[in-house]
Image: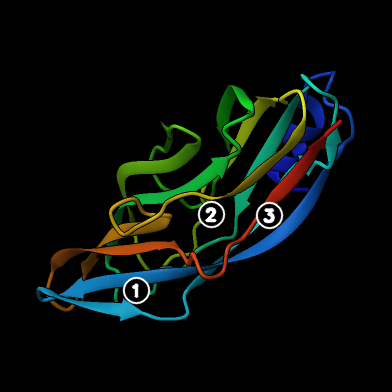
Amino acid sequence: MSAAAALLAFAAPASAGEAGAVTSSTVGYVCQSRFDGSWFPINGYSRGFSTTAPSKVSPGAGFNVAFDPAPIVALGEYNKELTDIEVAYKVSPEAQVLGYKLVGGKNLGSAAFHVERRGAEFVVTSPDSIPGGVEFDLPSLVVTLRAPSQGAVTTGPGGSSFEKRSFGWNRLHPANDQWDPFQCYADPAKPVVFSTTAVG
């Protein structure tokens, strides 16, 4: 059981209704980076996520949704050091946000991560640096929500452009010792839904 799923098991509000179900998703991204001042595309990049959420809740019920990104290895030949790592999630704006927290994480060194709210989006990020070439696992994000009176609460990847990244970091390239961004946003031609919680 992941850290996020474990927290969900004991921290879900009493009115949550059905227990959380885990779904696995793969997000395809549109990505670009820069080297010696020139931008270039990075084709075919994708990331995996596990999301835990109840399939159904009562109107007005409180419940948790947990987002657990797959571990990452930033190849050392292109990434000597990483900073400003970001991963963005979004939640149906009709759901009321009661709270959120980060759980777990691995091989992050002294990097401290926090959550930035951007409307219906949540960005897990850190200004600190971690070394490249080492597998690390970002913290899971657990969001506590109150269901609307009807409909469904859906979640998915956040971000919409290179300026508002869905995923990425800034990296120090070992070949030229220059800092450049690795920027990705979820491919709008291949939309992904992480979870759907019916209300009723």
- Tell me residue 198's x, y (percent): 81, 39
Q: Residue 76, labelled with which disc?
A: 1
Q: Residue at x 64, y 28 (%)?
A: 95
Q: Nearer the viewer, residue 165 or 190?
A: 190
- Which kind of residue does numbered mark 2 sit on? Asp
Q: Quadrant of residue 38?
A: bottom left
Q: Residue 50, labelled with which disc?
A: 3
Please state which of the two labelled residues, at mark 3 or mark 1, is closer to the viewer. Answer: 3
Q: Residue 137, labelled with which disc?
A: 2
Find the distance from the CA under tag 2 to the CA under tag 3.
Answer: 13 Å
Residue 188 appears left or right of 172 = right
Among the two numbered marks 2 and 3 on one chain, the one whose residue lies closer to the N terminus: 3
Q: Quadrant of residue 76?
A: bottom left
The residue tagged with tag 3: helix, strand or loop? strand
Residue 69, placed above or below residue 177: above
Q: Residue at x 30, y 65 (%)?
A: 182
Residue 26 appears left or right of 39 = right
The residue tagged with tag 2: helix, strand or loop? loop
